Image (cartoon, rainbow, N blue to C red):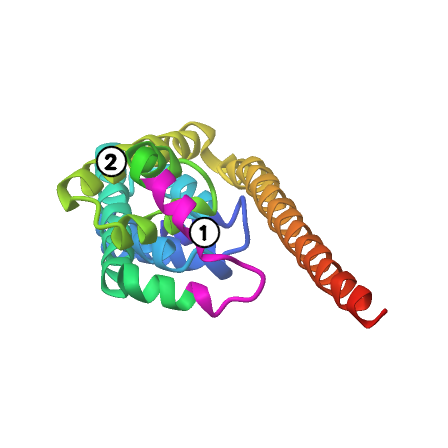
Amino acid sequence: MPLVTLAAAAEPTGGIAGWAADLVDVLGGPGAGLAIALENLFPPLPSEVILPLTGFAAGQGAISLASALFWTTLGSVVGAAILYWIGRVVGRDRMYALWARIPLVKVSDLERTEAWFQRHGTKAVLLGRMVPIFRSLISVPAGVERMPLPVFLSLTALGSLVWNSVLVLAGYWLGDQWDLVETYVGVLSKIVLAAVIVAVVTYLAVRLRGRRRHRDGDQRPAARQRR
């Protein structure tokens, strides 16, 4: 029986689930790897749907569990490597030039971020592969900072294997309730997104307040001179 039909018991066969199920039906393990490679390049494609569905496919005998883990991890590495090279092509000079055009930010902010990444980049890449939203984005600064490619690929493979294993095995064990993984990981993604939004809003508020104080400070001496 086609995987897309089996998966329909948990989630409608249209959308991401149906698309991923079709890929696994047609291509097997490489189809799951392709889906995850695209998920890295287009974060709106949810790994919390693709990976548990792949585990469910392994549980149904459509592919082996080893094949599911191998191909999804390979797909993660391939997708991350493409983003790494995009960051490398953009380069440090272009990044600074683009940053200078963004309102309410300072070059010193980027310099501090760069210094932090130089100190903690290996941990950021390894752990970042296990955090929703940042899983894909962390590859770009690694490329900009020209992290040695073998180091980047090794850390990405290890971090991706951990994340993929948790979600694939969850789908494998949950069987036709594999879609529960999406619910719980979706909550985690929303928490991370909310934290990012709060951080950005706080940053912008501090910047605007600082500019306002600076402007008010410039106006006071001018007022005194007119007197």
Q: Main secondary structure of the magenta part?
A: helix
- Pinpoint residue 149: horizontal percent, then vertical percent: 16, 46
Q: Is residue 139 magenta?
A: no
Q: Going 45% across and 66% down the picture, which residue do you hit? A: 100
Q: Going 82% across and 72% down the picture, which residue do you hit? A: 226
Quadrant of the image occupied by residue 188: top right
> Which dot, 2 or 1, sits closer to the camera?
1
Q: Amino acid at mark 1?
A: Ser
Q: Nearer the viewer, residue 98 or 213?
A: 213
Q: Residue furthest top?
A: 173
Q: Which residue is mark 1?
A: 108
Q: Is residue 222 above or below residue 109?
A: below
Quadrant of the image occupied by residue 195: top right
Is the residue marked by circle 1 packed among few (<14), some (14-19), or many (20+) residues within 10 Å?
few
Is residue 156 in sight in this rendering? yes
Is residue 79 in sight in this rendering? no
Q: Residue furthest right?
A: 227
Q: Going 27% across and 33% down the picture, which residue do you hit? A: 65
Q: Is residue 114 magenta?
A: yes
Q: Which residue is mark 2?
A: 155
Looking at the image, do the residues carrying marks 2 and 1 touch, with CB atoms under 8 Å apart? no
- Pinpoint residue 153: horizontal percent, then vertical percent: 19, 42
**Stretch in magenta:** 99-117
Quadrant location of the C terminus in the rendered image: bottom right
Q: Left or right? Give the position of 81 relative to 114.
A: left
Q: Is residue 4 above or below residue 167?
A: below
- Separation (CA) of disc 2 from disc 1: 28 Å
Assign a secondary structure to mark 2: helix
Q: Going 37% across and 34% down the picture, which residue do you hit? A: 163
- Pinpoint residue 159: horizontal percent, then vertical percent: 31, 34
